[in-house]
Image (cartoon, coloured by chain):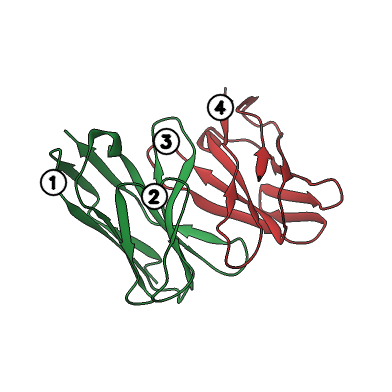
Amino acid sequence: NAGVTQTPKFRVLKTGQSMTLLCAQDMNHEYMYWYRQDPGMGLRLIHYSVGEGTTAKGEVPDGYNVSRLKKQNFLLGLESAAPSQTSVYFCASRLLTGEQYFGPGTRLTVT
Amino acid sequence: GQSLEQPSEVTAVEGAIVQINCTYQTSGFYGLSWYQQHDGGAPTFLSYNALDGLEETGRFSSFLSRSDSYGYLLLQELQMKDSASYFCAVTISGNTPLVFGKGTRLSVIA
């Protein structure tokens, strides 16, 4: 079991560039999430999915889009990166209860 | 709205016991979970309480009182490697994302 994996681990973008972050889980979880975490801060929910083909907005969705075409994958897209999107991005998946599992994170810098 | 309150920082001595409290006000409640995050790392799941009482997992224990909307994480025999941030989170319902507290930064000193 790999759990939750994320690619890439690190990325540097220039303002205006686009990219897609990939999250994959092999635990057959229905629920998947994308968070961002800024230095010294807590987790902020960007978008989430309650099942294949579904997505919903979280606390800070502006500037991001997501897709969940397959149950095991959850993609986060930045269409036009801005310096304010410099952050660490975590993907997570969970059971119906509170056992949530996080990926290792993607460290994104936008210059 | 939903709110979880936990102390922002706690300092404890190596070998001691520390308790990190979490009080919550949410529109629903299935259970309370705890996560540990080391600097530069990802949050990792520690424990989940759905029913009142104490759950023990090695040096870590977690307690829940649903009537008091309160829980705590108890760390015994503290080690330097326990220095990390600890987050409590409430499960409101199956389709609703977890509501996280802002985290407690634990520093273990010699």
Residue B73 seen anywhere in this rendered image of the structure? yes
Residue A52 rendering spot, x and y as whole percentages: 41, 76
- Residue A4 falls left or right of residue B58: left
Residue B73 rendering spot, x and y as whole percentages: 69, 43
**The C terminus of chain A, quarter of image:** top left
At 79% from the left edge and 47% from the top edge, which residue is drawn? B69
User: Are callouts 2 and 4 both on one chain?
Assistant: no
Amino acid tagged 4 = Ser
Residue under numbered circle 2: A61
Separation (CA) of disc 2 from disc 4: 33 Å
At 72% from the left edge and 44% from the top edge, which residue is drawn? B24
| Among the two numbered marks 1 and 2 on one chain, the one whose residue lies closer to the N terminus | 1
Apparent colour of chain A:
green
Whether residues under marks 4 and 3 lie with C-beta atoms below 8 angstroms apart, the answer is no
In the rendering, which numbered label is found on residue A17? Answer: 1
Q: Residues within 10 Å of mark 3 (few under 14, many from 20)?
A: few
Q: Say which chain tag 1 marks.
A: A
Q: Which of marks 3 and 1 is in front?
A: 1
Residue under numbered circle 3: B39
Secondary structure type for disc 4: strand
Amino acid tagged 3 = Asp
Amino acid tagged 1 = Gln
